[in-house]
């Protein structure tokens, strides 16, 4: 994959949909980066990788560890790192943690969740040399406060609020925006209301690109499959089948055979 830049990413708006996918480790980062424009080290790793029920217990140290793994596996990839819950609660905290991400990894940008209420944080990071990706709509880090995952944009009031959020985040200097769990027609209006690329997840096909959690789209994450996820392979079945075959061959001593010994 040829290294993307912020300039190239922004030029793709209205020309070609952007392909973003999460990555948490070197092994998958190398594979995923062959077809993706952007790798997102999402704090969703706390669920699919860490086995937790939500993203809220993720730490900045974990994000830096996984970002390094991803950057090691895909050194040419454009990498965005999620700022975890509590790591951008005020301007100083946000900047201190974003600087840690930049100093201790090769991440190209950080992502923070929130709309107009977080625009001052985006502005503070951008004015201090940090590239920022916004994230509006359904906010996974609001899971406990909102009592679950709530689809947004169901009323005209919410639609106007989302457009206001997107414009505030753009004006604060974000170069790209993720919109999650929003009615498709509303997400399309949001994408049309700003000049930065708007990347959807569960937000329909009228936006400027798509992002999926890699373990969802490869069918590895079995506990829950959201409606918007398309599983391109059944990874869980493929893995279970392969390991079952390995177990059988170990038990009946057909592995290792003469091709797999020194
Ligand atoms: O953490 C994550 O994987 C994300 C995506 C859902 C956009 O933020």
Image: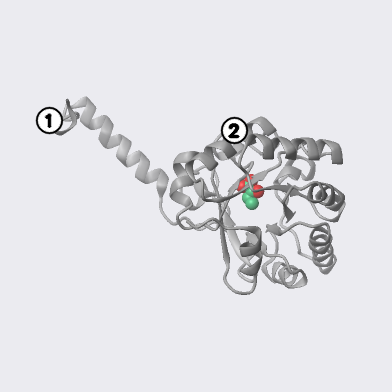
Seen at 57% across and 33% down, the residue is 50
Is the CB atom of the residue marked by disc 1 within 8 angstroms of ligand 1's nearest atom? no
Residues packed near mark 1 inside 10 Å, few (<14), some (14 to 19) or many (20 plus): few
- The residue lying toward the viewer, choosing from 7 and 159, is 7
Q: Give residue 122's position: percent from left, percent from top.
A: 81, 50
Looking at the image, which is closer to me, 248 or 169? 169
Q: Earlier in the sequence, mark 1 or mark 2?
A: 2
For label 1, the SS is helix
Secondary structure of residue under mark 2: helix
Relative image position of residue 254 (x, y in whole percent)? 16, 30
The percent position of residue 44, horizontal first and vertical second, equals: 61, 42
Is 169 positioned to the left or the right of 247 in the image?
A: right
Horizontal relation, residue 245 to residue 229: left or right: left
**Residue at 35% across, 45% down:** 238
What residue would you read off at disc 1?
Answer: 258
Q: Can the viewer see residue 227?
A: no
Q: Residues within 10 Å of mark 2 (few under 14, many from 20)?
A: some
Q: Nearer the viewer, mark 1 or mark 2?
A: 2
Front-lying residue, 151 or 161: 161
State the CA–CA distance, disc 1 to disc 2: 40 Å
Image position, residue 22 (x, y; %): 56, 48
Q: Which mark is residue 122?
A: none
Report which residue position mark 2 lands on.
65
> Which quarter of the picture shows residue 71?
top right
């Amino acid at each position: 994959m040829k290294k993307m830049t912020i300039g190239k990413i922004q030029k793709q708006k209205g020309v070609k949909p952007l392909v973003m996918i999460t990555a948490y480790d070197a092994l998958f980062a190398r594979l995923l980066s062959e077809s993706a424009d952007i790798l997102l080290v999402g704090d969703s790793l706390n669920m699919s990788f860490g086995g937790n029920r939500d993203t809220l217990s993720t730490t900045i140290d974990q994000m830096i560890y996984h970002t390094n793994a991803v950057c090691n596996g895909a050194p040419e990839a454009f990498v965005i790192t999620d700022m975890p819950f509590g790591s951008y609660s005020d301007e100083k905290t946000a900047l201190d943690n974003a600087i840690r991400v930049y100093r201790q990894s090769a991440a190209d940008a950080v992502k923070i969740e929130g709309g107009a209420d977080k625009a001052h944080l985006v502005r503070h990071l951008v004015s201090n040399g940090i590239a920022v990706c916004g994230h509006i709509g359904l906010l996974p880090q609001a899971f406990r406060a909102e009592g679950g995952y709530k689809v947004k944009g169901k009323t005209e009031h919410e639609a106007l609020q989302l457009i206001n959020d997107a414009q505030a985040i753009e004006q604060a200097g974000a170069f790209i925006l993720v919109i999650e769990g929003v009615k498709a027609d509303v997400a399309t209006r949001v994408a049309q209301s700003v000049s930065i690329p708007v990347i959807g997840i569960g937000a329909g096909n009228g936006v400027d690109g798509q992002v999926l959690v890699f373990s969802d789209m490869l069918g590895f994450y079995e506990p829950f499959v959201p409606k918007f996820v398309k599983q391109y392979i059944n990874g869980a079945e493929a893995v279970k089948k392969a390991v079952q075959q390995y177990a059988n061959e170990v038990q009946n001593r057909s592995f290792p055979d003469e091709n797999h010994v020194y």
